[in-house]
Amino acid sequence: MNGFPILSLMMLVPLVGAVACLLTEAKAARSIALIATLIDFALGVLLWANYDVGGAQWQFQEKVELFAGFNWALGIDGIALMLIMLTVFLMPVCIGAGWNSIEKRVGEYNAAFLLVEVLIIGVFTAQDLYLFYIFFEAGLIPMYLIIGIWGGTDRIYASYKFFLYTLLGSVVMLIAMLWMVNEAGTTDIPTLMAYDFPKEAQTWLWLAFFASFAVKMPMWPVHTWLPAAHVQAPTAGSVILAGVLLKMGGYGFIRFALPMFPEASAQFAWLVYWLSMVAVVVTSLIALVQHDMKKLIAYSSVAHMAIVTIGLFSFNVQGLEGSMIVMLSHGLVSGALFLGVGVIYDRLHTREIDRYGGLATNMPYYALFMMLFTMASVGLPGTSGFVGEFLSLAGIFQVSTWVALIATTGIILGAAYMLYLYRRVIFGEQKNADAAAMLDLDLREWLMMAPIAAAVLWMGVYPESFLAPMRQDIAALDARIARARPHGDATLAVAKAQPKTQDAAHEGAHH
Amino acid sequence: MHSILFIVFLPMLAAIIGGLGNRMLGNTVVKSITTGALFVSCALSWPIFLGFLSGHAEPSVVPVLHWVQSGTMSFDWALRVDTLTAVMLVVITSVSALVHLYSWGYMEEDPDQPRFFSYLSLFTFAMLMLVTADNLVQMFFGWEGVGLASYLLIGFWFKKPSAGAAAIKAFVVNRVGDLGFMMGIFGVYLVFGTVSIPAILDAAPGMAGTTIGFLGHRFDTMTVLCILLFIGAMGKSAQLGLHTWLPDAMEGPTPVSALIHAATMVTAGVFMVCRLSPLFETSPTALSVVTFVGAATCFFAATVGTTQWDIKRVIAYSTCSQLGYMFFAAGSGAYGAAMFHLFTHAFFKALLFLGAGSVIHAMHHEQDMRFYGGLRKHIPITFWAMTLGTLAITGVGIAGTIGFAGFYSKDAILEAAFGSGKELGTFAFWMGICAALMTSFYSWRLAFLTFFGKPRWAGSEHIQHAVHDAHGHGHDDHAHDAHAHDGHGHDDHAHGHGHEDHGDGTAGYHPHESPLPMLIPLIVLSLGAVFAGLVFHHSFISEGDGEFWKGSLVFSEHLIHAMHEVPTWVKWAPFTAMTIGLLTAWYAYLKNPSFPATFVSQFGALHKFVYNKWFFDELYNFLFVRPAFWLGKVFWKQVDIGIVDRLGPDGAAWVVAKGSTYAQKVQSGYLYSYALVMLLGLVGAISWAMVG
């Protein structure tokens, strides 16, 4: 692939597709969008196949100077590669999800999705700070339109909420970026990742980035836009929102906050832990009492993302790798769960849990897929959910046993709300005649569900395929932040020694 | 290829084929594939076990696939075979194969047979992965896999609300235990730098006496790790505190109860403690906890078992109680005895459950023993099989001479607890003796109520339905009325009435013996219940310092000697307890059937406490379930909507729109302008920054 601008091509294909969609009528637009996303997926596979695991940190680099130090600079490492793969894998599924259910402005709809793909690939490939910012913020615009135009009855409120939250975060991040470029004299992200900012400056730079990433994640308590957005978004919008857009926050932490401000990250680690612990417990409990399927899954996303932040800020390899796997896994699993909701929403046009029941009788294969994704969400070993959750929690255990304990309660609460959902929708008597008359998955739905199911099992049984490309980059990050690593509370003391009082005091100081 | 690969993965393939093929393949094909796979697994397992029994086989590990490598944490899919595994292999594959066969008869009329058989095979695969694990994470995989299968099978009749509720309860309560297990694995990794079981067991003695920080305090390292792991074992093996799911799990079809909730899955906790016995040996505190929990469970569950009316629930509490025996054996250091009881218990408890299934089958799905009675002549094979099972579980035998399976293993446990010389050992011994008395009482109570006396079937709605379906309507409405008010606690009541109609309380119903596929497993398991103790006790618990175990668990020669040297009254105590239990049951249910009612009216409060299972369910409901839902609502309505949204986006909207409803004013056209403004703003800001 020497010098071939495959990354630019991956952005160009959906861009051309988007323009074409706008110019054609509905039927053609769908086909164009599907073909464009499939080509991009093929390019992604090519990218992965040619990615040199264990080679240079940054590969497939492209750089064109535009003006005034502003560069079209692209390049990926293993972390970005995996997130790009997730994106191009889910995109054709998204197009498929809106195949029949979207009837108005079909061209614009598909163009918006293709545009989302362009911009997200941009986010994960950008090596120029400003370029990243543009992609990062602009990626929300088509999403905002998808919710606002093709969404449910309360779509305006939802899109407004979404917009307001994300905008506030991004303004402060922009100011921080300007300061950083001024200080370091470059917009090159790899250079900035190795640049040591003064410790005092790190504090507020970190906070500025945190404001933006925490909203995107989303972390408690800036999460309330997510349930609203999910509930109103069309199925494919939810899939892409949960599957990929939420990963931008985690990517931001791993690419910017941690390597650029290691000391500040350590300084604020306990803020992150606290918010994450609260999120695991509180949003799980909220999920337990939901009557709306999408809202339930949205709240569960907040709880799962909290495991990501906990893993990221555990400052060790298990935590970081675990977080990445949780992100990939959550992308697949929550995407699939939203698809599953979409499947029955298309038939009955309601997300109300009580309107269903007993679907295992008339939709056995649907029940089977949903059982798999439910179990993956719950983190059953053998599915992708377990590998990520296990590694993240193993990571945080080395830092704080308290945080590990609270975060691990997520496995109990997660089981409770997911199985409760499953019981109400899929088990039980067929108490609603219209729900009982629904047909099982058709071919299109099989084609959307089956590949995700395969990926979930693959990642659960042989995660090495996904861990290997990232290993070297995580190790580099781990080495970079090692100097700020917090002292764990579970340190061993050698036989017969007196209890180490300073360790206890150190731990106690956090409570 | 090593035969263990076939043993483990054939059931998995069968489950996948059966599960996906389902109705396309049809009942017979799926049933043949799954049952066939299990019989092959079983046939391959026995040679492995016999190899270890004769002392020829050597422990080995068969690598399968790389699993996870993250930093220094690394674990693979691999199958470990040693004596401990071999024992579990024969238990699992034999009982599973027999249960598959039995289900051909028991599930005959169920419309979802392919699903049922696939679940059974899936369970077997997960259980085999658990016992062949070479590292803690694969053990956890099996652990959760059997949990999933258990969930699916308890909820198999998913239309029944009670089945759905029981399934969730089983999964969630087990997850509480899993929290401990997971934390234990994290701790093990932190301390030892590995999760490989052999490596941990080697390094464990070196860590004795060290301390570790945990939840802000410093504790003995090995105690923390062992107790965390043991919490996992408590969940899976339904020990006191985390036992509440097991009785409810009886919602599943009876073959499931026999396989999962008696013979195999619930013993996983015992297996884990034995597998990790060198780890537990380094912490006397942890062993005391294990002993105490085991002894308390064995006593508690036995008390509840004496009062229940549902035939399956009696056996479920009995299982819970027997698991308690196994745990206090392990806590006393007699891991060999714990495994031996696991082994014999698998046969006689599976037998009792399958026998109960046969009774239920004969009685048209009636499970309430108040409506049984006099069945021994109608279903003689089932009667004899269950009698042998009862003789085995109550531990009938002559000390030092000969006895049924449970005699060898239970007496060994009681002697070990007494002989361990620990204070808690003596406590466990007395708890065990009390439980043995009650075991004998409730087991014979079950047998007498079911097979002896006069038929009391007429009171059963299930029987009424069966009779009405068979003979049309109306010929014994009277009998029905006579017993309608008989709902609670007075089993003897049924005797006095019912004569006026059929004169025999049968309501004209004719129970039939079960078909051959159900009888063969009963007969095979009966042989196990009779001979398993006699044949294997030398290998498991006495011969030449645990040569049989080949180091797969800690075997204390010292304790074996102590067991032989306990006073004679200790050796005879279980027999005495068993006899008293038998005589009490005989008096209360055959000789003087009005006795139970008299007893209940005398000790009403005590009976109520025990009958309601010590009110654990009510307590947990009050402490955990209701608060969880209440908190969920508060966090949602009051915090998320009431505070976060009001101060956040809604507050901003209010400011912008000055009190009018913002959402109504904004048309979708505005969205474009917002987007445009946003983009322009960005471009403007960046250009300004770069130029300036």
Image (cartoon, coloured by chain):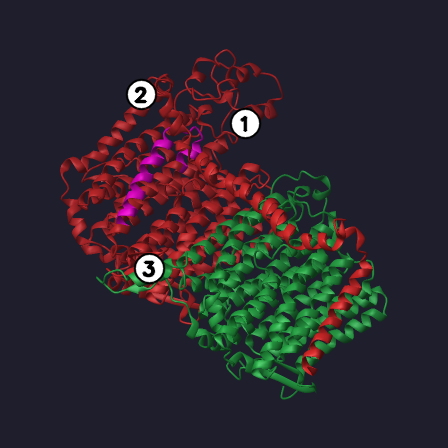
Regarding mark 2 in the picture, which secondary structure is present there? helix
| Label 3 to label 2: alpha-carbon separation | 62 Å
Mark 3 neighbour density, 10 Å: few (under 14) some (14–19) many (20 or more): some
Question: Which quarter of the figure is the C terminus of chain A placed in?
Answer: bottom left
In the rendered image, residue B87 lying in the magenta stretch gets the answer: no
Q: Amino acid at mark 3?
A: Ala
Mark 1 neighbour density, 10 Å: few (under 14) some (14–19) many (20 or more): some
Q: Is residue B128 left or right of residue B200?
A: right
- Label placed on residue A504: 3
Check the image and report above or below for B367 versus A295. above
In terms of sequence position, does the residue under pointer 2 or pointer 1 come before the other? 1
Is residue B280 visible in the rendered image? The answer is yes
* Numbered range of the magenta stretch: B287-316
- Main secondary structure found in the magenta portion: helix
Of labels 1 and 3, the one closer to you: 3
Q: Where residue B16 sits: x, y (%)?
A: 55, 57
In the rendered image, residue B313 lying in the magenta stretch gets the answer: yes
Given residues A433 and B594, the one toward you in this image is A433
Label 2 sits on residue: B587
Q: Are marks 3 and 2 on the same chain?
A: no
Label 1 sits on residue: B462
Regarding mark 3 in the picture, which secondary structure is present there? helix
